[in-house]
Amino acid sequence: MLDSSQMDFRQVELPTLKRVLSNIMAHPSSADPDAHEAGLDEYARLGGNAIHLHGEGGETHSRRATGRWLQQRGRRPEFFLCTQIGHAGWDEAEGREIDRFTASAVSEDIDADLELLETKYLDFVYLDDNPRSPFEPVIEAIGRQIELGRIRAFGVRNWDAKRLVAAQGHLSANSLPGIAAVVTTELALPDAQEPLWPEYVPFEPELRAAVEALHLPVFAHAADINLGQCLFGDEDVSARLRKHWLERWHDPANHALVERVESFAAARGLTTREVNIAWLLSQKFPCIAITPLPHMLMGRRSEYQRASHFLLNEADRTWLALPLTEHSRPA
C-alpha cells in the first residue's frame, strides 16, 4: 500500500491554462462552514493549490470565507480560483426559471465573485449551456472580461460535443480566447443510467472525443455521489440524500465492474474509492478531481492522497473494462 503520510498531491501541467495545478481541487461546502478554515489549511499543507466555488441557490459563505482565508494567509497569488457563473434565477411570482445565459449575467456574476472573494481577478470561470439560446453573445462577453483582466480563462459545463466544438471554432475564427477546460459531474468508472440531474449532459463517447481533439483538461467532481461509490457499500451520507442518486447506478454492467474493482483494489492494497479516483485521474486528457473540502479533515483524506499518485496504465484500464474470470485477474 502507498504510504500517504508524507505525500503531497501530484501536480499536473495544464497548457490551456498556463498553470500547474494539484490534481485534487478543493470544493468548500456551505453545509459544513465550521470546517472551512481548518480544511483549507490542511489542503494547502498537502500541496493543494486549486479551489472550486459556486453560488447556486444564492450561497455566499464559501466564497466569503475563502477570500478571507486567502487574505489572512497572504496566499492569493499561488491559488487557482475556479467559480461558476450564469446560474439560472427563479421568479417566485411567476413560478418559473429566469434564463441568465446572457452577456449581462456574465458581468454581474463576475462582479459578485470578485467582491465576495476580495480579489482583483478570477483564474477561471465556467458556465452551463442553454441550447435554446445562441452562445456567441455570451462567450464574446467572457472574452471581454478576459481582455479587461478580470478573469484569466474560462470553461464550460453541460455543453454537448456539438456546441463545444462550434463554440471553440467561433472563438478561434474571431481571435478570441478559447475554452480552456471542461467541468463535469458525470465522469466515472461505473456506468450511470441517468445524469445527476435531468438537464445535465452525460460524459459520453462524443464528448470525450471532442475533449481529446481540442486538447482540453477536465475538472471532474469526485465526491461519492459522482463516483458511484454506493455500488461498493461505503458511500457517504450525502450520496444517499435522493433516491434517484442511488438508482441511477443500477446498470447491469456495474455488477461485474464491482467485482473487477474490488479484485484490482485488493491486489494493489488500495480501497475501491482510491481505484475509482485513480481511474478518473488517469484519462488520456489531463483531469483534476474536485473534492469536498471537509474530506481534508477526515480519514478519507489519505484516500485522495494515495489516488492522486496511483496512475492506471493502459493495461489497467483495459482490464477493468473486461469481464472478470479466473484467467484475467490482475497481476
Image (cartoon, rainbow, N blue to C red):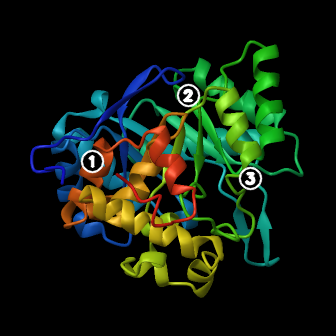
Distance from Cα at disc 3 to Cα at disc 1:
28 Å
- Kindly identify the amino acid type of the residue bearing the numbered disc 2: Ala
Marks 2 and 1: which is nearer the front? Answer: 2
| Left or right: 141 in relation to 120 | right
Work out whether 91 lies above or below 160.
below
Which label number is shown at residue 153? Answer: 2
Q: Of callouts 3 and 2, which one flags the residue occurring earlier in the amino acid sequence? A: 3
Q: Picture coordinates of residue 28 (x, y %)?
A: 36, 58
Q: Is residue 95 visible?
A: yes
Residue at disc 3, secondary structure: loop
Which label number is shown at residue 100? Answer: 3
- Kindly identify the amino acid type of the residue bearing the numbered disc 1: Arg
Which label number is shown at residue 15? Answer: none
Distance from Cα at disc 2 to Cα at disc 1:
23 Å
Residue at disc 1, secondary structure: helix
| Left or right: 110 in relation to 74 | right
| Left or right: 175 in relation to 312 | right
Task: Categorize mark 1 by other alpha carbons within 10 Å: few (<14), some (14-19), many (20+).
Answer: some
| Left or right: 294 in relation to 286 | left
Q: Picture coordinates of residue 205 (x, y %)?
A: 73, 47
Q: Is residue 36 visible?
A: no
Work out whether 267 lies above or below 250.
above
Task: Categorize mark 2 by other alpha carbons within 10 Å: few (<14), some (14-19), many (20+).
Answer: many
**Depth order, front residue of 321/205:** 321
Residue at disc 2, secondary structure: loop
- List the residue tagged with mark 1: 68
**Depth order, front residue of 240/84:** 240
Q: Quadrant of residue 6?
A: top left
